[in-house]
Image: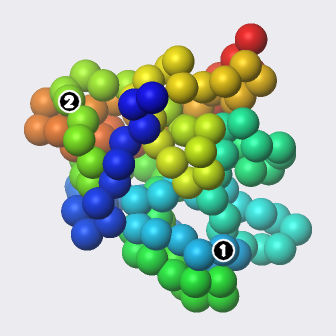
Amino acid sequence: MAAISVTAANVLPGSNSNIQVGTAGATITQGQSLYFDSAAGTLKLADADGTSPANTFSGIALNAGSTGQPISYTAQASALVPGGTVLAGDVIYLSPVAGGITKTYADLLSGATVIILGVVNTDLSLNLKPVVGGVKA
């Protein structure tokens, strides 16, 4: 499994980040992937093999917080520093582990929603521009 181990203190929004603010609906760590729970009006940890709406993507957390606290996040950025070990050209996916990201397609289990979060630039930042695909067979 090539899940990206994120060091929260190393996550940076980078240039052209579309920064938004929401309310945490769970304990969130900087660098985790998020979805918006419209029923609760809060941000929670996204999960590629979760049930809807957990298998959707709203952004990457830019700060940590507990339930009820404000969370800044970005849904798009041309140079997000993901806080983990990546290589230029790596394709980054929403992980089947809640809040995670991965660079290995094989990590996605059958039935998981495939969401490509972006591609790593030559400076090792992530061009975060999500593309939602289908369900992995």
Are the residues flagged by discs 1 and 2 in contact, CB closer than 8 Å?
A: no
Q: Residue furthest top?
A: 137
Q: Residue furthest right?
A: 39
Q: In percent of the image, x 70 and y 30: which residue is there?
A: 113
Identity of the residue furthest to the bottom in this view: 69
- Give neighbour class at mark 2: few <14, some 14-19, many 20+ (Cα, 10 Å): some
Q: Label 2: which residue?
A: 87
Amino acid type at image mark 2: Leu
Give the residue displayed 19% in from the left and 27% down from the top.
88
- Under mark 1, the amino acid is Ala
Q: Earlier in the sequence, mark 1 or mark 2?
A: 1
Position in image of residue 101 (x %, y %) = 47, 42
Residue 39 spot, x, y in % from top left:
88, 68
Residue name at image x 45 percent, y 77 percent: 64
Taking the spot 60% from the left edge, 25% from the top edge, the residue there is 108
Residue 83, picture quadrant: bottom left
Task: Relative to 106, say whether 81 is above or below.
Answer: below
Label 1 element class = loop
State which quarter of the image contains the C terminus.
top right
Pick whichever, 98 or 36, lies toward us. Answer: 98
Tell me the quadrant of the picture where the N terminus can be found: top left
Q: Does residue 90 lie above or below 22 as drawn?
A: above
List the residue tagged with mark 1. 26
Image x and y of residue 27, in percent: 59, 75
For mark 2, give the secondary structure: loop
Nearer the observer, 96 or 115: 96
Callout 1 crowding tier (Cα within 10 Å): few <14, some 14–19, many ≥20: some
Q: How many marks?
A: 2
Instruction: Give the residue furthest to the front.
Output: 1
> Can residue 72 be seen by looking at this rendering?
no
Real-space CA distance between mark 1 and mark 2, rounded to the nearest whole angstrom: 30 Å
Is 50 displayed left or right of 124 in the figure? right
